[in-house]
Image (spheres, helix red, strand yellow):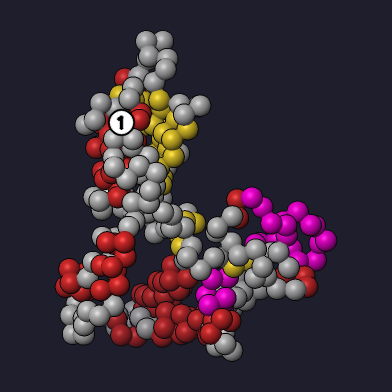
Amino acid sequence: HLFRILFLKLTKDVYKYLQRCVENNQDFNVQMAIKAGIITNGLKYSLATGNWGDQKKAASAKAGVSQVLNRYTYASTLSHLRRTNTPVGRDGKLAKPRQLHNSHWGLVCPAETPEGQACGLVKNLSLMCYVSVGSESAPIIDYMTGRNMELLEEYDPVMNPLATKVFVNGVWVGTHNTPQQLVSNVQELRRNGTLSYEMSLIRDIRDREFKIFTDAGRVMRPLFVVENDHRKPNKGHLVFNREHFNKLQADTGVDTAGYNDEDTMEMKYGWRG
């Protein structure tokens, strides 16, 4: 957004210069037309002050976008990096936006919040919580289409009233008759790394819905997987076991100095297995 504003400013300056040259019957000089400092100085100003927008329109600019990282203590640095802000006016004495909500469980720290006016409005993400980057939704739709998913255009509710609806990022893409099998197949693909580990899979048995989310900006946290299949010998136990733990512990002794990221991933077992 900021670059767009600065680039438009640059093109306006070039346009004015060319207009002057045409009116005065002068030759064009590209070096004179393009003022390289407009974009550089604009970015420097915004990063230095935190006012995100045009320098001349400081009143309409968004304040506090870039901040100086707090280095008072290690804990305060972590707190500053994980901080979230609720865009609600600080003046009002509304209690509801400040209170803990059930949906905060495991995602927001219940204790780390400032005193005074910003209490409950400025929150902190839990340390093991992360925000999804997002991935393509087309591969998972293609996979399910090849696994007997009936596309929405071909679905007839009269002929098949008990079919489970399949949603991808909130969009109804089709229906499936054996949702249990589909869910377990997609889960297996996610766990072995074929699909992105950021993908969220939700099956609502009562409403007969299977929701898949691959978009960016979802707050997520790690979970331990428990084996529920009665045919497996480790039913009721964690899939993560002592063998995995020992492999992860062995990773700490691996010397990866001088190797690139791909080679490092091959040398180490890693959290993704």
Q: Secondary structure at mark 1?
A: helix
Considering depth in this image, is 241 or 112 the residue closer to the camera?
241
Q: Which residues are magenta?
A: 78-102
How far from the left and from the top, in percent, is residue 239? 33, 51
How far from the left and from the top, in percent, is residue 131? 46, 60
Which picture quadrant has residue 58? Answer: bottom right
Residue found farthest to the top = 158
Considering depth in this image, is 233 or 77 the residue closer to the camera?
233
Considering depth in this image, is 182 or 85 the residue closer to the camera?
182
Is residue 130 shown above or below 251?
A: above
- CA neighbours of label 1 inside 10 A, class few (<14), some (14 to 19), many (20+): few
Q: Which residue is rendered at x = 43% and y = 35% of the image?
A: 203
Considering depth in this image, is 241 or 41 the residue closer to the camera?
241
Is residue 141 shown above or below 114?
A: above
- For residue 141, side relative to residue 8 (left or right): left
Q: Is residue 87 magenta?
A: yes
- For residue 178, side relative to residue 65 (left or right): left
Residue found farthest to the front = 233
Residue found farthest to the bottom = 72
The answer, for residue 19, to whether it is visible in the render is no
- For residue 218, side relative to residue 79 (left or right): left
Q: Which residue is rendered at x = 33% and y = 35% of the image?
A: 230
Number of numbered discs overlaid on the protein picture: 1
Q: Which residue is rendered at x = 66% and y = 52% of the image?
A: 101
Q: Is residue 99 magenta?
A: yes
Name the amino acid type tagged 1. Answer: Gln
How far from the left and from the top, in percent, is residue 156? 37, 15
The answer, for residue 224, to whether it is visible in the render is yes
Is residue 57 shown above or below 88?
A: below
Which residue in the structure is indicated by mark 1?
181
Q: Quadrant for the C terminus, please.
A: bottom left
